[in-house]
Image (spheres, helix red, strand yellow):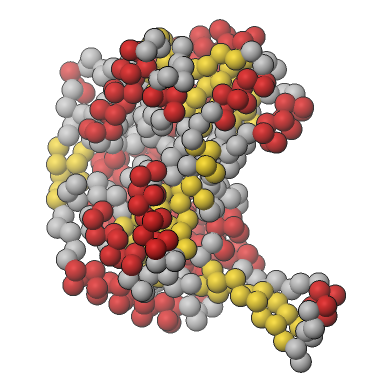
Amino acid sequence: MAIATVNPADGRTVEVFDPLDEAAVERRLARAQSAFESWRLTTFAHRAELMHRAAELLDQANDKVARTMTLEMGKPLAQARAEAAKCAKAMRWYADRAEALLADEHPAREDVQDSGGVSAFVRYRPLGPVLAVMPWNFPFWQVVRFAAPALMAGNVGLLKHASNVPRTALALEELFARAGFPQGCFQTLLIGSSAVEAVIRDERIAAVTLTGSEGAGRSVAAVAGDEIKKTVLELGGSDPFLVLASADVAAAAERAVTARVQNNGQSCIAAKRFVVHADVYEEFLSAFTARMRALTVGDPAAEGTEVGPVATEQGRTDLEELVADAVGHGASVECGGGRPDDPALAGGWYYLPTVLTGVTPRMRIHREEAFGPVATVYRVADLDEAIAVANDSPFGLSSNVWTTDDADRERCVRDLRAGGVFFNGMTASHPAFPFGGVKRSGYGRELSGHGIREFCNVTTVWSGS
């Protein structure tokens, strides 16, 4: 795949970038190692000052950054602006809290004495240069939620971004440089996927974090595992959205639309499978379908657009194949199910918001992630069946449950196999809460104290005198 900015709204190639050659990659690796040796010795106060400066610069450039994201991957402009603002918020959150999150931990005195020591504590120390392999769907947020904690912990970062968002990748490098981070603390590697293995195997790379597809995760984890290097993987998701008998159905249907089509439906934590109790199924389906059908599909750079194009032509083809397979095996299309008729959108990679019912396990979409504005709605008889359907997925990133019954809540927290359970709302990421999944959605956690400690050497310091 070429490293290029291609506008998904019209299919036009805006700019093509030459990938870095081996010598250029080597210079950046050497620079990262050199930067780490000094950066790891800096104070939290100094790191926080620079991180706050980066947040300030990002706020000032909000519209410019947002328009770059919209141009390269097609998210509606309002959502791109919100993403940039969220990144600045996360930078400030880690700038203000990193020192406390990584403070020395002291075991109980009796445990120290029982070990034969007179003192002991646990210290979190940075690992070194961390390679981040990041996706295009939240091209600023995915990077910042790695970079802010990693840099505040004393690590340095190397970014291999998705090949269709090179302008965004370079903007991130420029942002940290303008904020005053020393040369080599955060660098972008404009390289293709075939060059990633050599970077992972380089002895200067201490760890790898990846957000992306299951296939990419397997590949990166295999190489890192061979080198015995720490990895954090955030992979796909096919999150369930349970609407139980006691739910506020009108509120659930309204939020369900946003939960499905945020970022043009291209979000790992977007609700994709809507599992609805029979008592409220018809009411929910009617309201949900009407709202999905009414969404404004159009140019993502235009104010008021709610759903823009799919980011890549292949991505739209994948959606079309999933829907065709489902329909071919008996699923019903309640709305959407194809490309828009508007001639003004013909050149872009648009796909209409779609609702499918009658989905069965024999259909691919029952097991595979639909990365675009396509929803499947299931009718279930009771909570037992709802949980069974929700868990019948190779993924386990997050989940949503709508209920006012406390017993239902406890049961869902106990039995849903996912990294998060969100009640009467939609899944969202926030710096204070750990983010990640189970099963084929990956392992490890980002954000919160858990995230900043992922790339630390957890060191026991013990003294016998």
Side (left or right) of 155 relative to 192: right
Side (left or right) of 317 relative to 105: left
Query: Residue 199, relative to residue 76: is it above or below?
Result: below
Residue farthest along the bottom direction in this orientation: 465
Where is residue 128 drawn, in percent x and y? 44, 73
User: Which residue appears at 65% of the width and 76% of the height?
Assistant: 460
Of 377 and 303, the residue lying toward us = 377
Of 9 and 324, the residue lying toward us = 324
Query: Residue 264, relative to residue 336: is it above or below?
Result: below
Where is residue 436 drawn, in percent x and y? 53, 47
Of 70 and 206, the residue lying toward us = 206
Where is residue 78 drawn, in percent x and y? 39, 36
User: Which residue appears at 38% of the width and 56% of the height?
Assistant: 222
Query: Residue 339, relative to residue 464: is it above or below?
Result: above
Where is residue 452 drawn, in percent x and y? 55, 62
Side (left or right) of 25 relative to 383: left
